[in-house]
Image (cartoon, helix red, strand yellow):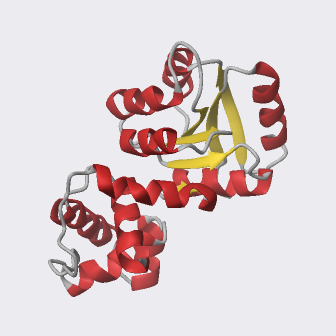
Amino acid sequence: MTPPVRIVLVDDQELLRRGLAMLLSTVEDIDIVGQAADGAEALAVIGRFAPDVVLADVRMPVMDGIELVSRCRDDHPGLPVLLLTTFDDEPVVQGSLAAGAAGFLLKDTSTEALAEALRSVAAGGMVIDPRVARIALARDADRGRDVAAGDDPLAVLTRAEHLVAEQLAEGRTNAEIADELVLAEGTVKNHVSALLRKLGERDRTALALTLYKTLHG
């Protein structure tokens, strides 16, 4: 039996936080191991419980969700932070993804969809609410990369890298890509590293967004 996904839940509104924890507690393979009211408190809770995923609100006092993503990237490398908010304005989305968030969902997401998102990011995937994907993809303009019209940024990829890129653009994990392409998972990891290097992206989230826009227009 697959072990449950261990979650630390972070939201400054206690009533909402406890309500969300109660909803997620009904999902068999989701385990809320800790809660915090802001990013600073969350860091201590994360250190204590070593979760698989952090589910955090963006707008919080003391330390907001975006800063929490940055701190987790430095202090807990590899720990995905999924941001949850009622706000879908461009600066929030851009800041969240630039910081390295594993995903971005709106607070009206259903319990089932949220649970699936938590499973996905725990497995190394990324999740972005379709309603804010348009904003997320627009971040290309801020990266300072000047690609002339008509140029193919994927032309530098090998055939194998291109196949992996197509899968990565759909948000699939390394294990899922390996299964689909009949490759060793270590080989997929090597291809992802090559894609990051060749396309000049700093993390997997930004890479997947770039690939999605390039491949799907």
Residue at image point 35% right, 70% down: 211
Among the 4 quarters of the image, the one containing residue 67: top left
Q: Is residue 68 left or right of residue 22?
A: left
Instruction: Give the percent coordinates (x, y) of residue 204.
Output: 35, 56
Among the 4 quarters of the image, the one containing residue 212: bottom left
Instruction: Give the percent coordinates (x, y) of residue 108.
Output: 76, 47
Q: Is residue 63 left or right of residue 2?
A: left
Residue 123 in view (yes/no): no
Q: Is residue 123 left or right of residue 213?
A: right
Q: Quadrant of the N terminus?
A: bottom right
Q: Is residue 205 above or below residue 62?
A: below
Q: Is residue 108 above or below residue 21?
A: below
Instruction: Give the percent coordinates (x, y) of residue 210.
Output: 35, 64
Instruction: Give the percent coordinates (x, y) of residue 101.
Output: 45, 43
Residue at image point 36% right, 27% down: 75
Q: Nearer the viewer, residue 90 or 76?
A: 90
Q: Quadrant of the C terminus?
A: bottom left
Q: How many marks?
A: 0
Residue at image point 48% right, 68% down: 172
